[in-house]
Amino acid sequence: MSARRLVAAILAAAAAGAQAQSPASDELAIWPVRDGIYMIVGAGGNTTVQVGDDGVLVVDTKLAAASDALLAAIRKISDEPIRYVINTHWHADHVGGNAPIAKAGSTIAGGNVLGAIADADEGAAVIAHENVLLRMSSQEPPFAFEALPTDTLFVPRKDIYFNGEPIEILHQPAAHTDGDSLVFFRRSDVLSTGDVFTTTGYPVIRPEDGGGIDGVIAALNRIIEITVPEEKQEGGTLVIPGHGRLCDEADVVEYRDMVTIIRDRIKSMIEMGMSLRQVQAAKPTADYDGRYGATSGRWTTEQFVAAAYESLRNE
């Protein structure tokens, strides 16, 4: 089997495994982060919720099956209207609840707009990079129309002002996918990263979705540029990963260093003419497998090496 076909087979198996996942529980954990920002954990990717006098903003909406549980968790935090949903990327464990969560909210609209369009304020606005809309609308079967972003960005940065603070949506090209965004709450000093940074395993890289290991490292470096540590490199800017525990800059630096070292090893092996099977047999991740590796589940070490190899081989 050719290297390309081997990579395709490994990544196809990973995608099938991810689609087979179901939420572990209807109960979601709610963790206060800072200044009206909360992290809701369970049943898919982490959800970030910002609340205040203007209403509720939600970053990522978990798996579709967890929608009722997510809405109930949000309502435990605030009964104010849900005004915005932001998607960090298009995968189902982060956008599955878009339709019901947005439907439960309402868009901020001026009186002149409401006079011309009767339903202009129905449903929260859903914001994402345009590649998220393109990916979601091209799937078979496609996502429901109600789940699609209603407001897209095609530039590196979009900002909104909500609940008394500036919020930056920062596109990270060719990372986990081609539509990843960081969401930075500037006053609260909290950064929601989506799946360009996780603490539960090696980076999930989807070359078939425009992702690549170099883009992941660039995104991790962007996180480090934004974050500012407190005393002894602990605390300071808080980082909500796509999956896993609440972090700070030191955690991201450690993760970035690990990914960079493995990238350099695989790149060197490719330059020596090694095949994917040879690279995997050489175990370029061996000294990190105890912390990040997996031999089963939705994303294994073998799949990570295959995805990194594919993205570097096509440079």
Image (cartoon, helix red, strand yellow):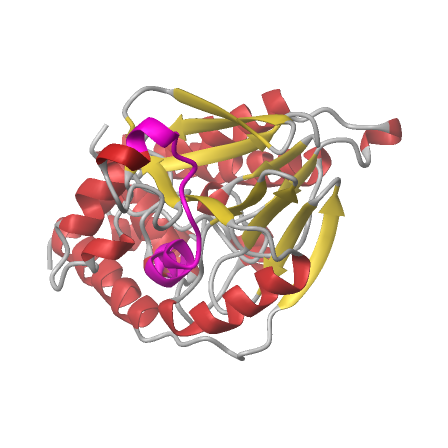
113 relative to 181 in the view: left or right: left
Tell me where residue 130 sits by quadrant. Answer: top left
Tell me where residue 116 sits by quadrant. Answer: top left
Reply yes or no: does residue 187 show up in magenta: no
- Magenta segment boundaries in residue numbering: 93-113
Where does the image place residue 124, in percent across and percent down from the top left?
Answer: 40, 47
203 relative to 277 in the view: left or right: right
User: Which residue sits furthest front?
Assistant: 115
Q: Is residue 162 visible?
A: yes
272 relative to 234 in the view: left or right: left
Q: Is residue 297 above or below residue 159?
A: below
Q: Nearer the viewer, residue 71 or 18?
A: 71
Where does the image place residue 211, in percent across and percent down from the top left?
Answer: 30, 39
User: How many labels, in total?
Assistant: 0
Q: Nearer the viewer, residue 284 or 43?
A: 43
The residue at the point 56 percent across, 58 percent down is 200
Q: Nearer the viewer, residue 60 or 83?
A: 83
The residue at the point 83 percent across, 28 percent down is 230
Where does the image place residue 35, in percent across and percent down from the top left?
Answer: 75, 40
Tell me where residue 290 sits by quadrant. Answer: bottom right
Q: In the picture, which quadrant includes the N terminus?
A: bottom left
The residue at the point 33 percent across, 59 percent down is 99
Q: Is residue 268 visible?
A: no
User: Which residue sits furthest right?
Assistant: 231
Where does the image place residue 287, in percent across and percent down from the top left?
Answer: 59, 51
Q: In the picture, which quadrant includes the C terminus?
A: top left
Q: Nearer the viewer, residue 276 or 301?
A: 301
Reply yes or no: does residue 104 show up in magenta: yes
